[in-house]
DNA sequence: ATGTGTCAACTAACATGTTAGTATGTTCAG
DNA sequence: CTGAACATACTAACATGTTAGTTGACACAT
């Protein structure tokens, strides 16, 4: 079993700020979320230390954090691996995400200001440009920002943070969908519906539009279990 | 400034299982949630090590976890304190809890089985007995179990876990409310409404009943900011 | 050929030594 | 007496040495 003894595809520590542990955490998380380290990859503390030029303490702390977020599975005294997807976990994350985003958009529809609407409209225009240019990665980012902006408009920082924590698995799975471009136009239309409902300050319409939009994702993720069966837990 | 150099009121490690770090985490978390260590208490790694008879590594890992959950504030290179309440954080937690519990109860109303209804009814009868006996602590526990059971009926383990993580601050604040007993009967009635809606498998009624019930908590917490002002962040 | 027991190598977990940043208390200038 | 510069003591953060548990290979018995 000659499993990937080469270097792990990790970014560099230097570019970041904060404690060493925090920087190591960021670097590892990015590698996992962007599928640089696919599910099942074995992470060895020693190797990470050597490669990043740090000692084991900050690496241990970073891995503990990733373990709490279920991005890695630690086998005590033995090994730690990048966790595989579990369809049931993904369905859970979908449920949680929907619960939070619907509550948020419902609230925001009642409180949104003109400035916030303009910022959202600006982001939406950007999305349209990116779709027209065929820049899928750019649209992906703008899409995420659209949702994040709405979360932020609740006035609760913690909502965005909690949602991010909850939908880590979801974000990772979404990366697998990037190649398929055909959904961008539909997604755009759905965002427009959400935006219109917010413009009209209609909580029910906003909720329904967002519910429909979010509902599209899970049906696109489910086929992945067959397509990338080695990334998923055996069920 | 002679701040509490005496022993911290911590439980014992021996009684628990799992890794040392996990056990230290549990002991500290209990002490914080049950207000054995009130907000503002300074936690010194060295003291904790000595008292629990472990080295600094597991303590550091436990504190990192508590820090991620915002139960302690770590001042880099200086000190770590049990975090004070922040009313805005509590409002956030209320929002998150409501979002999750409403989504859960709405879903459960559509899927609940006879067995699950019976289990819930059994818990409800227990609640009534405890209220009649004036056992507030017992009612507090049964109350929590009532909500946890409903979460569990979603079939998603992660929902319960996420909610627990989100409402740690809320749980801690609720401890301050324990002395005031007068709400028990009302709470009981509200639980009954939720239970009835679930019996009728009516998602909308269940949602409304739960929303009303949860809405009572925040209005009881808000006065605490004056009553225990030293436990709260200055605003 | 297959199942079992032993052993060696490797890993995470834990303990402890070292470094660097922060706060406090003191001294000295104004 | 007051305020700022400095020295000291203390803390968390980081590095490294040590321990113990798990895995997988191999020998051996069936």
Image (cartoon, coloured by chain):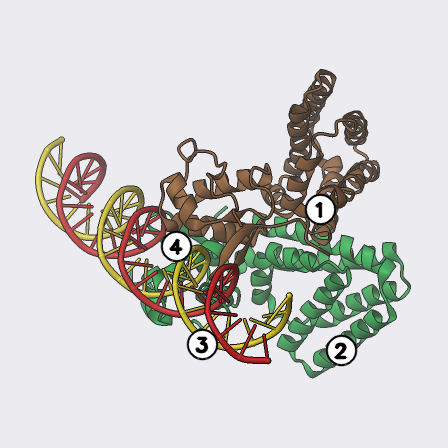
Chain colours: A brown, B green, C yellow, D red
Front of the two marks 3 and 2: 3
Front-lying residue, A156 or A16:
A16
Of mark 4 and mark 3, the one earlier in the sequence is 3
Mark 4 sits on what residue? B80
Locate residue B70 relative to residue B140 in the image: left or right.
Answer: left
Dot 1 lies on which element? Answer: helix
Dots 2 and 1 on the same chain: no
Q: Chain of mark 2?
A: B
Front of the two marks 4 and 1: 1
Q: Chain of mark 4?
A: B
What residue is at 61 percent from the left and 47 percent from the top?
Answer: A162
Mark 1 sits on what residue? A229
Verify CB contact (< 8 Å) between mark 4 and mark 1: no
Mark 3 sits on what residue? B14
What residue is at 80 percent from the left and 38 percent from the top?
Answer: A216
Q: Chain of mark 3?
A: B
The answer to whether A85 is drawn above or below residue C29 in the figure is below
Q: Quadrant of residue A130?
A: top right
Mark 2 sits on what residue? B128
Verify CB contact (< 8 Å) between mark 3 and mark 1: no
């Amino acid at each position: 079993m000659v499993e990937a003894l080469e270097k792990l595809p990790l970014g560099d520590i230097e570019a970041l700020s904060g404690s060493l542990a925090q920087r190591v955490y960021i670097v590892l998380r990015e590698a996992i979320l962007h599928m640089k380290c696919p599910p099942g990859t074995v992470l060895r503390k020693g190797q990470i230390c050597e490669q990043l030029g740090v000692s084991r303490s900050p690496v241990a702390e970073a891995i503990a954090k990733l373990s709490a977020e279920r991005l890695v599975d630690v086998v005590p005294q033995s090994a730690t691996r990048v966790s595989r997807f579990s369809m049931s976990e993904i369905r859970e994350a979908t449920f949680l995400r929907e619960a939070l985003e619907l509550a948020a958009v419902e609230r925001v529809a009642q409180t949104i200001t003109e400035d916030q609407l303009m910022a959202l409209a600006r982001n939406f225009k950007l999305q349209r440009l990116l779709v027209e240019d065929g820049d899928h990665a750019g649209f992906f980012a703008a899409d995420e920002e659209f949702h994040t902006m709405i979360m932020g408009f609740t006035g609760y920082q913690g909502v965005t943070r909690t949602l991010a924590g909850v939908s880590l698995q979801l974000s990772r799975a979404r990366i697998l969908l990037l190649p398929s471009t055909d959904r961008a136009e539909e997604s755009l239309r759905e965002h427009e519906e959400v935006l219109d409902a917010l413009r009209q300050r209609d909580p029910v319409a906003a909720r329904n539009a967002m519910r429909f939009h979010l509902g599209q994702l899970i049906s696109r993720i489910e086929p992945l279990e067959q397509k990338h069966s080695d990334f998923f837990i055996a069920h």
